[in-house]
Amino acid sequence: MGFKSVLCVTGSDHSDQDVRIAAGLCAEVGAYLSVLIMSPPPLVLMPPPLGDGILEWPTQRAQAIAMLDKRFRQIETFSQDMARLEKTSREIQNLLKATSLCYDVDIDYCDHASVDDAVRQRAHCNDLTIIGPALLNDNDLGPLVINGSLFDTGKPVLVVPKGAEATLSPRRVLVGWDSRVEASRAVREALDLLSRAEDVRVTLVDPKATYNGNGAEPGADIAAYLTRHGARVSVDRLPSAGKPAASVLAQHAIDTSADMIVMGAYGSRRLRERLFGGVTRWIVGKPPLPLFLAR
């Protein structure tokens, strides 16, 4: 089954680059595009309780006045943020009207703790979530979207770094394989694009032949599975030579002219910032490649 419904999450202060990328991908495969524009506000602080209504100490009175002033500023910020969200929504709708896509555009203003839930609700009803360059560069909103769309749904995410030539019809794909469930889910979710690719490289780093893991011939089982689905597969077993497996995979993707890397996303929800930071650090200084992740 191909990707028929794609979610793009962007911030109200982002450029329209991420939406343009998502729109291009949807046009490529005839998918529906859902755009969610978000503007998570700062934490709203409430003034301390006043007891019997009398603040006995000047310090307490000053603190209460300061917090009330901050609350009023936050209310003013809310109005400004809503205006910015609505303005961005109009601009994106005008952009998409010029395309032949079927689409919807929604806005959401919620506290930071609710961002992942808002994203999760929408990602559940889409086949794929796009993380574009602007969101990837947003250290505040980006990790929350990763958490909601990837860790909380089991749905795949396509990370598109700046300068990458994003496509849902890649000719050459590198699959990072280690026989773990996350890698298996990534392959399953990417099965449509893998079966249509000209060359699929199943790549293992320092594989060990084990009875209950990689098998007697590491990579052979997943290669056979992909072949049954029409993929043209080869298996590469690489030594790490003391380097991180991710670095070895990235270099091999460059050496084999891959158009995309498919791999499992590891770690718990508590490690979302580490995953997000790891992805951003990984692509810095390397030829940009789309990264297809599944959990």
Image (cartoon, rainbow, N blue to C red):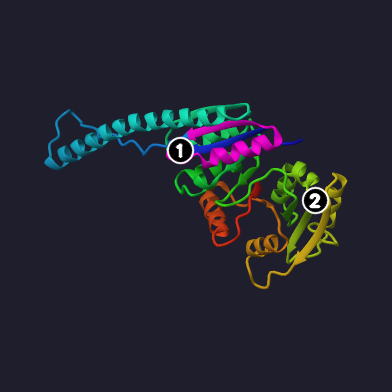
Of residues 166 and 81, the one nearer the viewer is: 166
Magenta stretch encompasses residue 129: no
The amino acid marked with disc number 1 is: Ala
Pick whichever of labels 1 and 2 is earlier in the sequence. Answer: 1
Magenta stretch encompasses residue 25: yes
For label 1, count other residues whose C-alpha is less than 10 Å away and answer few (under 14), some (14-19) or many (20+). Answer: few
Judged by depth in the image, the label closer to the viewer, 1 or 2, is: 2
The part of the chain drawn in magenta is: 12-37
Q: For the point 61% across and 31% down, which residue is it?
A: 33
In the rendered image, which quarter is residue 34 located in? top right
User: Extreme front residue here?
Assistant: 98
Q: Is residue 209 left or right of residue 250?
A: right
Residue 81, numbered circle? none
For label 2, count other residues whose C-alpha is less than 10 Å away and answer few (under 14), some (14-19) or many (20+). Answer: some
Mark 1: secondary structure? helix
Q: Please provide percent x and percent y for residue 162.
A: 55, 51
Q: For the point 25% across and 32% down, which residue is it?
A: 72
**Residue, disc 1:** 113
Whether residue 46 appears in this view of the structure is yes
Tags 1 and 2 in contact by the CB under 8 Å rule?
no
The amino acid marked with disc number 2 is: Glu
**Residue, disc 2:** 198
Q: Please provide percent x and percent y for residue 156.
A: 65, 42
Of residues 30 and 236, the one nearer the viewer is: 30
